[in-house]
Amino acid sequence: TQVKILTSVEVTSFATGLWIISDNNVDLSSIALMPSLSVTFPVRGKYLYNLAIGGSTLDAGSEYDFILTVGGGQDVSTTRVTVKVVEPPRSGEFTVSPVSGFEMQDFFQFSTKRWTDDELPLSFSFGYFSASSGNMMELRGRGESSFLGDKYLPRGAEANKFNLTCGMYAFNALDAKSKRTQRVKVSAVQVSAEEFEASVMSQLSSVSEHQDTSAVKSI
């Protein structure tokens, strides 16, 4: 997430501009997503002089004053913009049950509770993390229900003793989010090719009947 401050500057002659931050503990030049905090306005006219910084570089719940100074000779103007960084949902718990099972055989339930936030309503997404990409493979996208039941999970990597990292994100109304994870053991089940195919077809039939598209991702 980025913080963007969009600014239009009008000058009557040659002038320079400079962005600074009032917090002496923050090095603005190191977190700004721009090559330089200073700029030259060579002639009379209107200019766009925007500031963009990485949102994750600022402390959640804190306020920062960004100050733009534009001047030429004795004529100097300043503009101050106060930014409050939204605090993500906090104090939440996440559980997956059971903590071990077999792929394509055992159902797993996801639940989360005890979240605290001022920016309501909250929404939640659930899934498991890919060992190769590190991305969360969603079993259910954002929704207000804090429970997700009866989902199959793929086996964990054998090199990792079949452990699989499950996870969820909690979002507030301003899209700030928090993450929770839990490891479960999902082992391979020894079945014949015919039994495996029958199990997959049965699950696809169930998905079709209930139009549960999120379930396809867990098959």
Image (cartoon, rainbow, N blue to C red):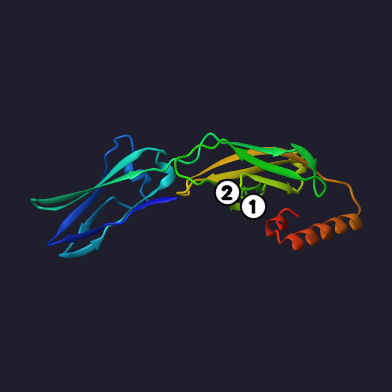
Classify mark 2: residues with Cα within 10 Å, few (<14), some (14-19) or many (20+).
few
Across and down, in percent, residue 57 comes to 41, 42
Above-or-below relation of 28 to 43: above
x and y percentages locating residue 101 in the rendered image? 79, 41
| Image position of 93 (left or right of 157) | left
**Within the image, what quadrant is residue 42 found in?**
bottom left
Q: Position of residue 110 (x, y in %)?
A: 68, 43
Q: Is residue 44 above or below residue 139?
A: below
Mark 2 or 1: in front is 2
Q: Amino acid at mark 2?
A: Glu
- Nearer to the camera, 149 or 61: 149
Q: Secondary structure at mark 2?
A: loop
Type of amino acid under label 1: Arg
Secondary element type, mark 1: strand
Q: Which residue is mark 1?
A: 140
Q: In 3D space, how far apart are the residues under numbered discs 2 and 1 (Cα atoms)? A: 11 Å
Q: Residues within 10 Å of mark 1 (few under 14, many from 20)?
A: some
Question: Can you see residue 156?
Answer: no
Left or right: residue 60 versus residue 95 is: left
Whether pointer 2 and pointer 1 mark residues with C-beta atoms closer than 8 Å, the reply is no
Residue 110 in view in this figure? yes
25 over 9 or under it: above or below: above
Residue at x 69% of width, y 60% of height: 213
Label 2: which residue? 144
